[in-house]
Amino acid sequence: MDKDSLLRYTRQNLASWDEAAPLHARINRHLLQEVQNAHYSNLDTHLTRLLLETIDIKGKSCIQICCNNGIDLISLKKKGAGYCLGIDGSQQFIDKAQTLSAAANLKAIEFQCHNIYELPETFLCQFDIALITVGVLNWMPDLPHFMKNCASVLKKGGQLVVEEIHPILSMYVEDETSYIGASYFDKKPFEDENGLDYFNHVKYKAKKNYWFHHTMSDILMAAINVGLHLTYIEELPENIGNYCADLEHTEHNPPLGFVANWSKLGSL
């Protein structure tokens, strides 16, 4: 994808997320109290097991890419991570993350506003772990470029950890009973103006945003092609992203999510 198109898509999406931030803040007021709990964690059990038992994040430097309001990185810090940095292209969500981090009274954790496609060079090869949690990959118009930037912030031997909605759900239309309504291989950007309230699903006239479907092979190959070595992947039957959640309870449910880990082999 050419640079002009890439930045047009991402900046339009970020403007839509900035617009949604006040609505999310009203819904998440309880978080100011919850993050003060020493044992607070927003991390799924599968992701927690991967981070603590397989990788061991204790004392390691971590960057969360597209961190939203920061609660996953705050959770990681509470589980013993070293220096933590959360980045997101939405200043409104970075402001929320900073507020929650202050309420949690944590040290050695920061949040900064950066578009993942426009990272400062000072981030290169600085982190032991890069974390991506649910609801990131489908906002990326250029997945190979995204993975290249994710790999670039890791030290040699560093780990990229991803928890995400399973790509097969892109085939489904969400309803009281979700149903298949799209091709798994459809590459056209999905354009939406109905808003980004994925908590209560309230529709509002929103700034236009764009969503992109990537297959599982797209994700795996984008990482492989930038020198990342897949060391773990698990497909999940549980609802982890609050999209088509009814499918978890169907007799023949598809995979709803996955967690994966890649190791950086070289110095790219």
Image (spheres, rainbow, N blue to C red):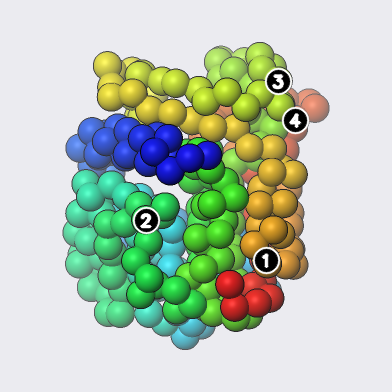
Instruction: Report, in whole angstroms, how far the alpha carbon at label 4 lies from the one at label 3.
Output: 18 Å
In this rendering, the label closer to the viewer, 3 or 1: 1
Badge 1 or badge 2: first in the primary sequence: 2
Residue shown at the point (66%, 14%) measured from the top left: 181
Badge 3 or badge 1: first in the primary sequence: 3
Q: Is residue 142 left or right of residue 114?
A: right
Quadrant hosting residue 13: top left
Along the line of sight, which residue is nearer the eye, 149 or 246? 149
- Residue 46: x, y in percent? 63, 58
Tell me the amino acid under the disc marked 2. Answer: Glu
Labels 1 and 2 touching (C-beta < 8 A): no
* Label 2: which secondary element: helix
Q: Which label is found at residue 183?
A: 3
In this rendering, the label closer to the viewer, 4 or 3: 3
Q: Quadrant of the C terminus?
A: bottom right
Q: Is residue 102 above or below residue 216?
A: below
* Label 3: which secondary element: loop
Along the line of sight, which residue is nearer the eye, 78 or 162? 162
- Residue 223: x, y in percent? 66, 57
